[in-house]
Amino acid sequence: MLGRRKLLYVGALYGCARCAACATPLAAEAVSAETPAAVALQEVVPGAYAHFGQVALTTPGNRGDIANLGVVVGDAAVAVVDTGGSVEVGRALLAAIRKITDKPIRYVINTHEHPDHVFGNAAFADLGATFVGHHNMPQELESRGEFYLHSFRNQLGSAAVDEVRIIPPTLLVQDELRLDLGGRPLLLTAWSPAAHTNCDLTILDETTGTLFAGDLSFLQFVPVVDGSVMGWLDVLQRLSKVPAQRVVPGHGRLVAPWPGALDDERRFLTVLANDARRLIKDGVPLAEAVPQIGVSERGRWQLFDDYEPRDATAAFTELEWE
């Protein structure tokens, strides 16, 4: 299993040309991959903010600032959605929040266990906030945490990784859970079966219809399968029924109307599954099949050649025993 994880985390995702016809690009200029910038929060709708991570590989220069992060402010308290790919990013996020409000941060919600979403958690550890996650997340962090700390030393640098603390959630979402920020209810949903990961969680700001989807929603660049291709397609069918108006994806410097934002991702995963099934039926061995799986999608996504081999391998190995 460590081999598959290493393939996934040799580099982190970066963005690409616009893929979803319905998407609204971020107005700000793109940030250079090697330019560490202060975390900027953009108000998506009143009281709900997003930080759009850099479209780049994780490097010491960008501090792992590659994932999208969220903040929702209620009448009484604040919730944070993911904390970034390093403690430095987490501290910068906290500073940006304090420029908006001095209300207490009551919840830190992690959408899944990947380092670019949770390595900033330590910046919030001493605030009295409750860490919230999918019921599978503690086990995922226990089984993978040490590997993440080891493998990211080359990408972030040892000094940055030395600051990271693996902090599991203490408030676990079994199915659905509502959190109240004071006149601002959030609906948290734990998804199964395994999709992008085995612990995917979404957060719906019910007041505005804004969905923070984590990495169940990839826009602009190739989705990465660390769970199950077929499970992801199954989850997308149900996820599309969430009564949202817009989505903040896990990656991609934009907000997109809902549920149209899922169209490109659904097509990509369907192509992966169909190509893998066809090649398996034809008796093509794995090594020869991988370069052919999903090839029709190459022009639609950046980072395709970096991540398609591991996505294709995941699809083939999942479906060969179907």
Image: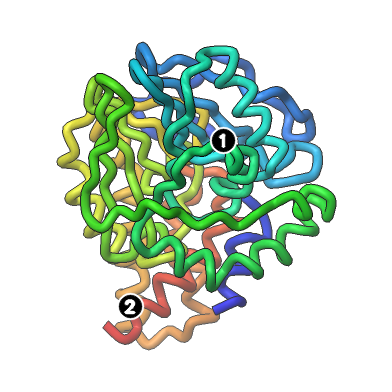
> What residue do we see at 35% from left, 27% from top?
256
Q: Residue at x 60, y 57 (%)?
A: 166
Q: Residue 192 at what x, y percent from top left?
A: 26, 61
- Measured from the top left, where is residue 225 in percent x and y? 44, 61
Q: Can the viewer see residue 140 in this picture?
A: yes
Q: Quadrant of residue 114?
A: bottom right
Element assignment for label 1:
loop
The three-letter amino acid code for the residue at tag 2 is Leu
Q: Amino acid at mark 1?
A: Leu
Residue at 59 percent across and 33 percent down: it is 53
Mark 2, secondary structure of its residue: helix
> Toward the viewer: 54 or 190?
190
Its colouring scheme is: rainbow
Vertical side of 4 occupied by 136: above or below: above
Q: CA distance from mark 1 to mark 2?
A: 45 Å
* Disc 2 target residue: 319
Q: Which residue is mark 1?
A: 127
